[in-house]
């Protein structure tokens, strides 16, 4: 029975090789390569360093590929490549779900790993631009064909390594930027909290703030009242000044009138002429005394005229002086009042200056606070602008990355379509394999039935031979007894 199973295993392997040859003949001429074909030494060195590990890397040599590739080594190498790319361990290829009613499951032990590796390599190699992979490349590999396949895999692994490095760099930069963004958001939240704290007056200081506001209102109201009083006093002072100016104008006008009146009196005195009759009478009366009194009279007349003029001037001067004295008394009273008002105005001005100084101090403090708030707002606005610029740069970077990922996704969709097409072909191939398996099962059932029939016929034949031998021996014994 063991000999029978081993023979069936060999027949199964031969059948797989025939199918691979037929599949390769059906595919026809291979496509042109879109990747560089590496030398054997470079391929061996690459797979030793990047794919194989341990004893497998030490034992893998150039002789395993050229001049006669070893199928076991190449199958193991493909298994390691699939393990590196997809995480399939070599043990996974030997496991396959089988139905419970299969007769002789040991026949499938040889074909399961080969078919698993073949199917997985058919799904993988189109990504390496190798579209004509067949079972013959696993069971009966050829040196040129294996070199092209391995060079395509090496090219893909180089590309994969570069892409992984680029993606790792993008991931690191993205993580760093995400950390920065989180730090910035934390800083923004902390700054917003600080701004809220600064803008909101604490309950401990609200009473003081209310008191200060009430005090400021009182000071403002007091300053407004004092300013109104000062403006009223200034108006009164201006009125007094206007009255003094009017009175001074009246004095000057009166002085001019007095001067004009004096001129007119002098003119009138010069124009007064005595009548000739009186002059003749007086001349007659006084002719006698003219000689004696002429000199004295002339002197006395002159003195009298002078005295009269002086008396008139003195009387007019006394009247003018009295008027001027009254005006001076009025002016002194008004000046006293103005001095008192000036003293009051000075005191009010001093108070207003002190209040203005306090207001200036408060306004300076308010200005400092406003400047501090403006500086903080400027800093925050600058930070927001910087953050917006960084966000725009990040968005541009993310959009570039998304564009790259979209391109990769489009390529991936193309590859998925190709894989679907290949899967459809593999399904068709599986259906054909299932049909062949069904035919093989039918043939095996027929052979088993024939074998069972042969066994039954042999057993019957042996029984007949034994019966014939027993009958012959009985006849021989009878013959012996007869003789």
Image: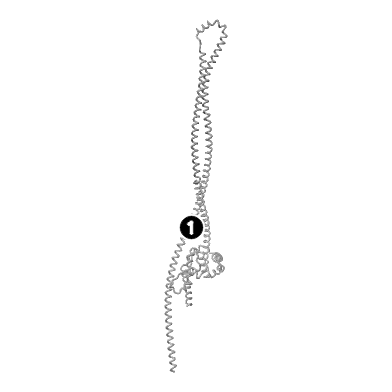
The residue closer to the viewer here, 117 or 247, is: 247
Which residue lies under the disc numbered 1? 405
Q: Quadrant of residue 298?
A: top right
Q: How crowded is mark 1: few (under 14 residues within 10 Å), some or many (20 or more)?
A: few
* Residue 100: x %, y % from top left: 44, 72
Residue 113 seen in render: no
Q: Is residue 437 above or below residue 399?
A: below
Q: What secondary structure is marked by label 1? A: helix
Residue 95 seen in render: yes
The residue closer to the viewer here, 238 or 143, is: 238
Q: In this view, does 291 lie above or below 152?
A: above
- Tell me the quadrant of the picture where the C terminus can be found: bottom left
Q: In this view, does 348 lie above or below 431?
A: above
Q: In this view, does 146 lie above or below 448?
A: above
The residue closer to the viewer here, 175 or 9, is: 175
Q: Total of numbered circles in the picture?
A: 1
* Residue 300: x %, y % from top left: 56, 11
Q: Which residue lies furthest to the bottom in this view?
A: 483
* Residue 84: x %, y % from top left: 52, 64
Q: Is residue 458 left or right of residue 38?
A: left
């Amino acid at each position: 029975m063991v000999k029978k199973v081993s023979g069936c295993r060999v027949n199964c392997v031969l059948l797989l090789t025939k199918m691979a040859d037929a599949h390769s003949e059906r595919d026809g001429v291979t496509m042109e390569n879109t990747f560089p074909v590496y030398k054997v030494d470079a391929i061996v060195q690459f797979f030793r360093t990047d794919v194989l590990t341990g004893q497998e890397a030490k034992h893998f040599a150039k002789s395993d590929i050229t001049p006669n590739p070893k199928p076991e080594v190449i199958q193991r190498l493909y298994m390691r490549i699939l393990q590196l790319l997809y995480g399939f361990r070599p043990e996974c290829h030997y496991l396959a779900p089988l139905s419970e009613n299969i007769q002789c499951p040991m026949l499938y032990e040889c074909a399961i790993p080969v078919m698993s590796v073949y199917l997985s390599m058919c799904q993988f190699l189109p990504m390496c631009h190798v579209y004509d992979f067949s079972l013959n490349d696993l069971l009966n590999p050829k040196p040129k064909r294996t070199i092209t396949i391995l060079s395509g895999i090496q090219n893909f692994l180089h590309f994969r390594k570069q892409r992984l490095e680029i993606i790792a760099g993008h991931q690191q930069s993205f993580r760093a930027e995400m950390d920065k963004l989180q730090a910035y958001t934390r800083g923004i939240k902390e700054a917003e909290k600080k701004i809220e704290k600064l803008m909101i007056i604490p309950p401990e200081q609200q009473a003081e703030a209310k008191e200060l506001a009430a005090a400021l209102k009182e000071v403002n109201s007091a300053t407004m009242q004092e300013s109104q009083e000062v403006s009223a006093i200034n108006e009164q002072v201006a009125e007094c000044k206007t009255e003094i100016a009017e009175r001074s104008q009246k004095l000057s006008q009166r002085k001019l009138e007095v001067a004009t009146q004096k001129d007119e009196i002098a003119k009138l005195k010069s124009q007064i002429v005595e009548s000739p009759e009186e002059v003749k009478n007086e001349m007659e009366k006084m002719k006698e005394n003219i000689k004696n009194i002429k000199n004295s009279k002339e002197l006395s007349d002159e003195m009298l005229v002078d005295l009269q003029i002086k008396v008139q001037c003195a009387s007019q001067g006394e009247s003018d002086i009295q008027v001027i004295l009254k005006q001076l008394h009025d002016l002194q009273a008004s000046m006293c009042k103005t001095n008192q008002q000036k003293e009051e105005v000075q005191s009010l001005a001093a108070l207003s200056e002190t209040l203005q100084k306090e207001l200036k101090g408060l306004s300076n403090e308010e200005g400092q606070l406003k400047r501090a708030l403006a500086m903080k707002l400027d800093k925050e606005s600058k930070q927001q602008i910087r953050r917006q610029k960084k966000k725009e740069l990040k968005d541009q970077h993310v959009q570039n990355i998304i564009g790259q990922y979209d391109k990769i996704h489009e390529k991936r969709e193309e590859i998925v379509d190709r894989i679907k097409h290949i899967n459809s072909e593999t399904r068709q191939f599986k259906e054909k394999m299932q049909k062949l398996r069904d035919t093989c099962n039918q043939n095996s059932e027929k052979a088993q039935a024939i074998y069972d029939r042969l066994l039954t016929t042999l057993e019957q034949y042996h029984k007949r031979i034994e019966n014939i031998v027993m009958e012959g021996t009985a006849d021989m014994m009878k013959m012996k007894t007869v003789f």
